Image (cartoon, helix red, strand yellow):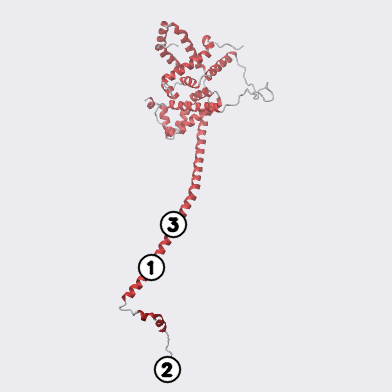
């Protein structure tokens, strides 16, 4: 099994024995990919930081029953997926107040007002930022299972079989999720994909 | 959607990484014989490039330290919970143990009293039996007529004869 030759699994076994240095090594290695996945699922930087930290706290909490049944990264991203889905469901049960709610005494004024802190950057950078925003927006509008499949697809540590394990579905179902998600993204991002240039807003 | 297995193979490879030169060559050869797939392939590679543009999210520099702090906080909270559970356990067990000890002590005391009463009863019975044995060893016993005035005779043994009264009676 690939897990037997997995250096991260060996590190995790050391964590199980109480080696805090091994745990720090794992956190340092995986904090970026975990943050990427969590942010793209939750779309909030602060919440993503908190949840990503909770992923590793959960890893530490579960260390005593860790067994090398799969690659460490598969196990880690399974925990990440579960915590993300729990948070998304929690948000559906307790939706936050909209920032666009009008002021109760003046309908023309928003209730919440924030200082505009935009920087004035060169046009190319603005276009780049706008493209990145569009990509993030398009990703965020995908159903959560398609979004997660596409985001995990970008993780070099995971094969298609391991992505299927994380998602809890078959290999063909996983590829189907990725394909359907990509079809939707192609539709949303077609103007840029066809011309290679994002249209400037009027 | 193009379902040709060759195209699908290269498509799924391209989702994970850039094709190497050998794979590119094979795909170009396939596309040459299937030109209708060219536009679709260009959209797919365009999307791969665009998705590759999505930057890494910024991870705070103190991320690892905060994870370790979170673990320490959990350990402290768990130790406090264990301490509170132990105190609650003692608060539940000590009164019950005291009650149990009281019941056992009362039981032992009652048993001891019962045993002492039994021993006293036995001692009394032994005295009676001993008296019986003593009497049974006497060779003969006076008849009941004699014994009828036994107390009078016993008490009378200590008296002195009234000589004057006896002389008068004579």
- From the viewer's side, name the closer residue of A66 and A23: A66
- Dot 1 lies on which element? helix
- Which mark sits nearer the N-terminus, 1 or 3? 3
Residue to which mark 1 is pinned = B123
Which of the chains bears the disc numbered 2?
Answer: B
| Numbered label attached to residue B167 | 2
- Closest to the camera, between mark 1 and mark 2, is 2
- Dot 3 lies on which element? helix
For the residue carrying disc 2, how many other residues have a C-alpha within 10 Å: few (<14), some (14-19), or many (20+)? Answer: few
Query: Which image quarter holds the N terminus of chain A?
Result: top left
Height in image: A147 above or below B88?
A: above
| Residue at 52%, 13% in the rendered image | A187
Which of the chains bears the disc numbered 1?
Answer: B
Q: Residue furthest front?
A: B145
- Please indicate whether residue A15 sits to the left or right of residue A199 in the image: left
- Please indicate whether residue B128 sits to the left or right of residue A105 in the image: left
Image quadrant assignment for residue B19: top left
Residue to which mark 3 is pinned = B107
Q: Residue furthest right?
A: A105
Q: Position of residue B32 (x, y in %)?
A: 42, 6
CA separation in Å, label 1 and label 3: 24 Å
Q: Residue furthest left?
A: B139
């Amino acid at each position: 099994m690939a897990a037997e030759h997995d250096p991260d699994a060996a590190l995790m076994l050391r964590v199980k024995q109480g080696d805090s240095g091994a745990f720090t090594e794992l956190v340092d290695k995986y904090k970026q990919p975990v943050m990427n996945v969590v942010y793209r699922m939750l779309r909030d930087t602060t919440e993503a930081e908190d949840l990503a930290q909770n992923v590793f706290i959960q890893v530490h909490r579960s260390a005593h029953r860790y067994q090398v049944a799969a690659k460490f990264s598969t196990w880690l991203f399974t925990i990440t997926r579960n915590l993300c889905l729990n948070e998304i469901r929690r948000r559906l049960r307790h939706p936050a107040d909209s920032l666009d709610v009008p002021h109760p005494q003046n309908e023309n004024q928003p209730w919440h007002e924030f200082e505009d802190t935009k920087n004035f950057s060169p046009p190319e950078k603005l276009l780049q930022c706008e493209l990145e925003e569009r990509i993030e927006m398009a990703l965020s509008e995908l159903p959560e299972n398609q979004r997660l499949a596409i985001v995990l697809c970008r993780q070099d540590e995971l094969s298609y079989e391991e992505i299927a394990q994380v998602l809890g579905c078959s290999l063909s179902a996983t590829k189907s999720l990725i394909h359907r998600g990509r079809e939707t993204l192609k539709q949303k991002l077609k103007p840029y994909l066809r011309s290679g240039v994002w249209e400037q807003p009027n | 959607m193009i379902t040709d297995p060759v195209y699908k193979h290269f498509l799924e490879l391209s989702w994970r990484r850039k094709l190497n030169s050998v794979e590119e060559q094979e795909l170009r050869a396939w596309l040459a014989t299937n030109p209708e797939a060219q536009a679709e392939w260009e959209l797919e590679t365009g999307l791969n490039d665009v998705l590759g543009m999505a930057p890494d999210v910024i991870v705070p520099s103190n991320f690892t330290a905060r994870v370790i702090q979170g673990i320490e906080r959990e350990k402290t909270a768990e130790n406090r919970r264990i301490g509170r559970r132990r105190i609650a356990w003692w608060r539940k067990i000590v009164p019950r143990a005291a009650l149990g000890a009281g019941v056992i002590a009362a039981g032992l005391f009652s048993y001891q009293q019962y045993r002492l009463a039994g021993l006293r009863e036995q001692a009394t019975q032994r005295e009676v039996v001993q008296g019986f044995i003593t009497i049974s060893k006497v060779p003969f016993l006076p008849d009941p007529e004699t014994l009828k005035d036994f107390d009078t005779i016993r008490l009378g043994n200590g008296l002195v004869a009234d000589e004057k009264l006896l002389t008068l009676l004579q």
